[in-house]
Image (cartoon, rainbow, N blue to C red):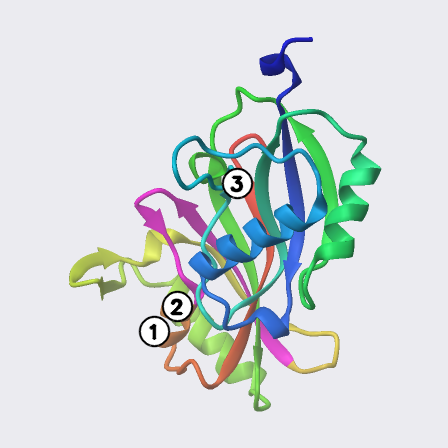
Amino acid sequence: MTQQENITRIRVEYTKGPSLRFTGHLDMQRLWERLLRRTGLPIRYSQGFHPRARLNLASALPLGFISQSELLDFWMDQPRPLDEIHQKLADNAPAGLIIRSVQVIDLSEDALQVQMKASEFTVRFFETQSQDLLEQKVSEILSSDEIIRKRRKKTYDLRPLIIDLQAEPLEDGQVGLSMHLRAEEGATGRPDEVLDQMGYTNTDYIVSRTALTLENG
């Protein structure tokens, strides 16, 4: 095989736990660069004076959020067995980052950001919520024809970005929220903006992303 034919694209599904809650998107990229360097795998780097590991994160997670399902692609100059890749990533991952799965992806596939369609989230409140009141707030959101808000000084309609919103019991018996929001380029719904519209501040809850939906997923 030629060097070009040896290039392998790997997709990793991983968690971002509470210890990484306040690690921002750019810092997560740097964290992954360090992690990949430590694995000793044949990571593919960019050309130039300051080579960087070639990697691609699916979707920026807002600061303060955690996640059960994040996606990242990286490239290698030579193939390796998937179990070896998984083990080396797991051995070098920091606390809070758990490697859930590793798979080979076709080199011709679009970038993860281009494939993104939607995200699912669970919201847990720090104080017990009335289910009736929470369901009322959900009903008000879903029955709205439009929800005009501002983001970065630009006006937008939040309502079409909400695919689904429900009040639901969590594992500990408390009532929380599940959200299914669009996550396309130029049309991404943010849970914190939905919650702000419902009258909650970011000190009232913790948000966990539970799934990412890709175009071909």
Secondary structure beneath dot 3 equals loop
Mark 1 to mark 3 CA distance (whole Å)? 39 Å
| For residue 212, above or below residue 168 | above
| Marked residue nearer the N-terminal end (1 or 3) | 3
> Decide: marks 1, 2 in contact (CB < 8 A)?
yes
Vertical relation: 162 (above or below) 176: above
Q: Is residue 53 magenta?
A: no
> Which circle's residue, 3 or 2, is located before the other in the chain?
3
Rendering coords of residue 77 (x, y %): 63, 26
Q: At numbered mark 1, what does the secondary structure look like: helix, strand or loop?
A: helix
- Find residue 62 and report its image quarter: bottom left
For this orientation, the residue located farthest to the bottom is 127
Q: Is residue 181 magenta?
A: yes
Front tag of 3 and 2: 3
Question: Considering depth in this image, is 94 or 102 the residue closer to the camera?
Answer: 94
Who is closer to the viewer here, 25 or 120? Answer: 25
Q: Amino acid at mark 1?
A: Gln
Residue in the image at 77% along x and 29% along y: 80
Number of other residues with Cα within 10 Å of mark 3, as a class: few under 14, some 14 to 19, many 20 or more: many
Residue indicated by mark 2: 194
* Number of numbered discs visible in the structure rendering: 3
Residue 7 placed where, x, y %? 62, 22
Range of residues picked out in magenta: 175-191
Which residue is at a point 62% across and 47% down the rendered structure image? Answer: 37
Checking the image for residue 197, the label placed there is: 1
Give left or right: position of 155 versus 93: left
What percent of the width, then of the height, locates residue 145?
29, 58
Give the CA separation, mark 1 to mark 2.
Answer: 5 Å
Q: Which residue is mark 3?
A: 53
Residue 95 is marked as none
